[in-house]
């Protein structure tokens, strides 16, 4: 068994769709990024790569590369899973926390869980997603952006 953790944060920006956990969420702002800004998937990819001892998402998908401009982060996640499988590793479970003051994420958690479980080739019961605010404290609390934490267990 191998464990990995990941963290990511992105700043809100006008005129972008908000995509979290592979789900498009109605909001007046999205997250600024080279990709679609799916901060939750980025944290999850880093947890998986960390467990596998394969560095981080920036090493595999550099934001200097035009190939990844505006890319659906689910494609990156599926590539990470394939990379692990190539090394004889498979994901056992993943647990994540999204930190956002707004919008309310509870109605979207089930959809995110289903999307990520599908990309991870897992039953949804092995993929857990939690959402919290910071009661107004810090950058997430001020609504400047969204952060995400992920932990993943991998077997080899
Ligand atoms: Mg990111």
Image (cartoon, rainbow, N blue to C red):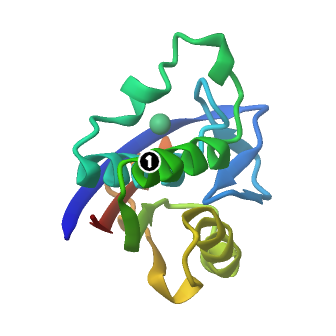
Left or right of 11? Residue 72 is: right
Residue 100 placement (x, y as % from top left): 49, 59
Q: Does 106 sit above or below residue 146?
A: below
Residue 147 in sight: no
Quarter holding the N terminus? bottom left
Quarter holding the C terminus? bottom left
Q: Residue at x 30, y 65 (%)?
A: 151
Residue 96 placement (x, y as % from top left): 40, 68
Q: Residue at x 32, y 66 (%)?
A: 152
Residue 95, quarter of the rendered image: bottom left
Q: Residue at x 60, y 75 (%)?
A: 113
Q: Residue at x 65, y 49 (%)?
A: 74
Near-viewer residue (13 or 123): 123
Residue 44 in sight: yes
Name the element at disc 1.
helix
Q: Does 30 sit above or below residue 2?
A: above
Q: Which residue is mark 1?
A: 86
Residue 77 placement (x, y as % from top left): 55, 49
Crowd tier of the residue under label 1, counting other residues whose Cα lies within 10 Å: few below 14, some 14–19, many 20 or above: few
């Amino acid at each position: 068994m191998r464990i990995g953790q990941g963290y990511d944060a992105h700043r809100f920006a006008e005129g972008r769709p908000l995509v979290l956990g592979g789900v498009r969420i109605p909001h007046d702002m999205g997250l600024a990024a080279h990709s679609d800004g799916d901060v939750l998937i980025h944290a999850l990819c880093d947890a998986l790569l960390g467990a596998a001892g394969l560095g981080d998402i920036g090493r595999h998908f550099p934001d200097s590369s035009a190939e990844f401009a505006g890319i659906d982060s689910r494609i990156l996640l599926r590539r990470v899973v394939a990379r692990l499988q190539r090394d004889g590793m498979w994901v056992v479970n993943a647990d994540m926390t999204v930190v956002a003051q707004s919008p309310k994420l509870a109605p979207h958690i089930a959809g995110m869980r289903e999307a990520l479980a599908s990309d991870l080739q897992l039953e949804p019961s092995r993929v857990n997603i939690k959402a919290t605010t910071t009661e107004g404290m810090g950058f997430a609390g001020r609504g400047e952006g969204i952060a995400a934490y992920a932990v993943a267990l991998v077997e080899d």
